[in-house]
Image (cartoon, coloured by chain):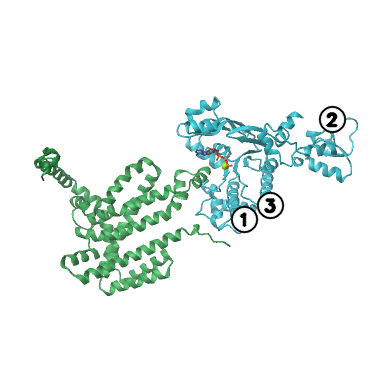
Amino acid sequence: MAICSFLPELLCKFPAIDDGTIRMARKSVDDGFKGFVRSYGDAIDAVVQPLQWFLNYLERAFVSSPWVLVLIIMIAVVYLGSRHVKITIGTALSMLAIGLVGLWNDTMITLAMVTVCTLISVVIGIPIGILMARSDRVQAFVNPILDVMQTMPSFVYLIPVVMIFGIGKVPGLIAVVIYAVPPMIRLTDLGIRLVDKEVLEAADAFGSSAWQKLKNVQMPLALPTIMAGINQTIMMSLAMVVVASMIGVGGLGKNVLQAIANQFFTVGFLNGFALVGIAIIFDRTSQAFGRRLQKHSEVIHG
Amino acid sequence: MASHAIEVKNLYKIFGPRGEDFVDVVKKGMGKAELNEKHGHVLGLQDINILMPGGCITVVMGLSGSGKSTLIRHINRLIDPTAGEVLYDGTDVCKMNENDLRQFRRNKTAMVFQKFALLPHRTVLENTIYGLEIQGIERRESEKRARGWIERVGLKGFENHYPNQLSGGMQQRVGLARALTNDADILLMDEAYSALDPLIRMDMQTVLLDLQKELKKTVVFITHDLDEALRLGDKIAILRDGRVVQQGTGQQIVLSPADDYITAFVKEVNRGRVVHVETIMRPLSGNPEGVSLPAGTVLEAAARTMTGAHVATAHVVDENGRPIGAIDLQTIIAAMVTPTSHADRQAA
Ligand SMILES: Nc1ncnc2c1ncn2[C@@H]1O[C@H](COP(=O)(O)OP(=O)(O)OP(=O)(O)O)[C@@H](O)[C@H]1O
Ligand SMILES: [Mg+2]
């Protein structure tokens, strides 16, 4: 660059910290991290062990039960949740199609994974959301963390997860939960904050305790918003299950990954469609359920 | 000290982040408009002193924005005062700790809200039992009490409807049933009847008066309607810009309004239904003549009795039947006619 001959070097070439220092810093952080994982590895394993059991248990229940039974239970759940015949029939047809092309077992593995991830996200997300709604300080603290979690590319945080927990189903599960929990937290917080002030005042006037207010007023009125959060969490878990197959999660995602690596066009698409199928089932059912929860807001004259 | 009276003393409320800092300037005479302009704070209430006697209905009146809702919310401390106290049976509600306040709200107060504030996800019945549910009263018992009040406010058959399936007036009656089911000593009613049609409104006024005869609650009732105030109120306080401009019985306010604002307020009122015969009778001279009218009879009723009996004079008797004064039709009609303005009254 000709222009650089007129300028002092400092303004032309970015004054980066020199390579040696960076290498040193990197090495010490990496070593420290590895040392931490090495010395606390057993403790970490012990803590996540219950997750492993839970996941294995559910996976076995899904995979080894006769497919007819699983299908009947699924149809029953979808119908009771949505009270919608079209959605129920759609569910039955897509599950049968999935079974016909030989993806039943992989689909069951993915279903088990998504179910566990969603449950964990709900169990973690709702209490954090409630705390956030109760205190502006907590909200100011948690919000930036959620921002980072939602904008960080999912591949990037696979790195610490793999370093701490290794490779396998449970690390995959943790990665999925980290990815899927923010909308749960945010929408719980939002739902509670949007509850009508006048109604809360009435609850206060009758002498409700904080817990009674939460149980009788805030949670029920926030429920439609919370359901939207659950819906988003399910969708994000499904998306992330595919990415997490890179660190050892089985099921449909693994097949997709192999199809990419080996250019198996048909296999890739079939698995992709199976994923889309269960995504639609989850989405429609949870949305219909959410709408049913809002029944009281329908005006029925007469 | 179990008189069940509510005593509001030197109460100030200034809305805004630094309300306390401006109590002194307000005491020195700064008005609502000036405070808002200079300091950006809203003067809600200033120097309120009202004794609301136990077992009586105290009506608070005033134009929109005069601070009625703000005042009633101080009694169960939905709003914290900037200065002053609210005493009930000798305890300052504003100094109660969280637990005492909760118990006070549960057991001593019930409130009807201007904007209904029903729980939208609960049916009429479930809304009505809310107060009892919070107190931990058994479901069967609370349901029985709630159904009684739902029927009394005329909503039988709607127990399982949701609030937004009801009209405004019906929702307001659900709010009323919810408060009455609580059976509390203090009943706070913020424009509890404003959304009702005239017939149901009369009916609900009767409900309140009947209830009062039996149960003698301490009722604070907010209304815009002077006729309603005069019918219900044992005592009436009139607010303007957050200040009490006059308080007293309905008769006192109608007969001697404190200023033009109140004169304007009472101008259209039917005095024949407010003023009692003993207020305008003259001392007895000679023997009691004509029909006898018990003290406390309103002029309209007196005139009806006298014209019915074809007499032009009557005498007033106390509760023991002793004559205490005389009255004639001429005086009654003169007293029923509204004087033109406050200024005219002063001149007369
Ligand atoms: N939270 C608040 N913050 C600021 N100003 C308030 C607040 N609540 C009430 N005010 C002000 O206090 C004044 C009195 O309001 P209030 O609601 O008590 O009036 P009101 O007499 O009940 O009127 P209405 O008859 O319309 O119900 C108004 O000027 C209002 O703007
Ligand atoms: Mg009001």
Q: Which chain is green?
A: A
Frontmost residue, B208 versus B339: B339
Residue A78 quadrant = bottom left
Residue B295 in the image, given as x and y percentages of width and height: 79, 37
Position of B230 compared to B293: left or right?
Answer: left
Residue B170 in the image, given as x and y percentages of width and height: 60, 54
Disc 1 versus disc 3: nearer the observer: 3
Q: Please identify the quadrant where the N terminus of chain B is shown.
A: top right
Position of B99 compared to A154: left or right?
Answer: right
Amino acid type at mark 2: Pro
User: Chain for mark 3?
Assistant: B
Say which element carries label 2.
loop
Q: Which badge, 2 or 1, comes first in the chain's sequence?
A: 1
Dots 2 and 1 on the same chain: yes
Residue that badge 2 annotates: B283
Frontmost residue, B45 versus B291: B45
Distance from the alpha carbon under mark 3 to that under mark 2: 40 Å
